[in-house]
Image (cartoon, rainbow, N blue to C red):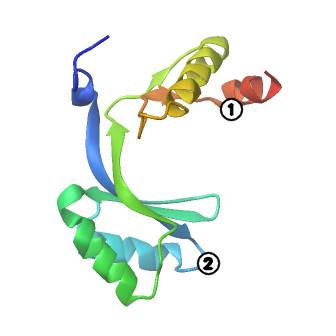
Amino acid sequence: MGEVGSVSWQFDRVAYFSFPVSSMNYDKALELGIDAGANDVLEDNGTIEIIAPVEHFKEITTRLHATKIQPEEAGLRMVPKQELELSPENTVQVMKALESLEELDDVHNVYSNLKVSDEALAALEAA
């Protein structure tokens, strides 16, 4: 086992917000995010995600509330600096291990730098 924080250098702590695209279109979300100091604004599968430095969390929250947007998720996350892609078989094994960790009562959050391919997701669903 590693020491506390022994792998934290591989992650960036960021402010994260997500809400449905039906709440605000992407262009307006992009403008709000840029004006509030976000690093990135993404749209994927009907969800808009805003990622920003931690120090901009309050500013983005305030701006979202001013536009009557209630994020589905708003909080701090650890985002990997570099993702690691494994074979589908190894990915399934790692994902099962991560799920086991998440189920432990004394574990609050589990972060990973694992990049999950569509092929690995299909293998996981079949398992």
Residue 26 position, x and y percent, is 50, 72
Residue 49 position, x and y percent, is 46, 61
Q: Residues within 10 Å of mark 2 (few under 14, many from 20)?
A: few
What is the total number of numbered labels drawn onto the structure image? 2
What residue is shown at x 43% (from left), y 74% (from top)? 29
Residue 17 position, x and y percent, is 41, 63
Left or right relative to 47: residue 58: left
Which residue is identified by label 1? 118
Q: Is residue 15 above or below residue 68?
A: above
Q: Is residue 3 visible?
A: yes
What residue is shown at x 35% (from left), y 76% (from top)? 31
Q: Is residue 17 visible?
A: no
Q: Is residue 1 above or below residue 16?
A: above
Q: Is residue 54 above or below residue 67?
A: above
Q: Toward which corner of the image does residue 74 lie, by quadrant? A: bottom left
Which residue is identified by label 2? 22
Secondary structure under the numbered disc 2 in the rendered image: loop
Residue 90 position, x and y percent, is 60, 12
What residue is shown at x 24% (from left), y 71% (from top)? 58
Question: Which circle marks residue 126 in the picture?
Answer: none
Please name whichever residue, 42 or 10, is drawn nearer the observer in this view of the structure: 10
The disc labelled 2 sits on which kind of residue?
Ser
Q: Residues within 10 Å of mark 1 (few under 14, many from 20)?
A: few
What residue is shown at x 55% (from left), y 16% (from top)? 86
Which quadrant does the N terminus fall into? top left
Secondary structure under the numbered disc 1 in the rendered image: helix
Left or right relative to 123: residue 21: left
State the separation of the CA atoms marked 2 and 1.
26 Å
Please name whichever residue, 29 or 62, is drawn nearer the observer in this view of the structure: 62
Left or right relative to 37: residue 79: right
The disc labelled 1 sits on which kind of residue?
Asp
Q: Toward which corner of the image does residue 56 lie, by quadrant? A: bottom left
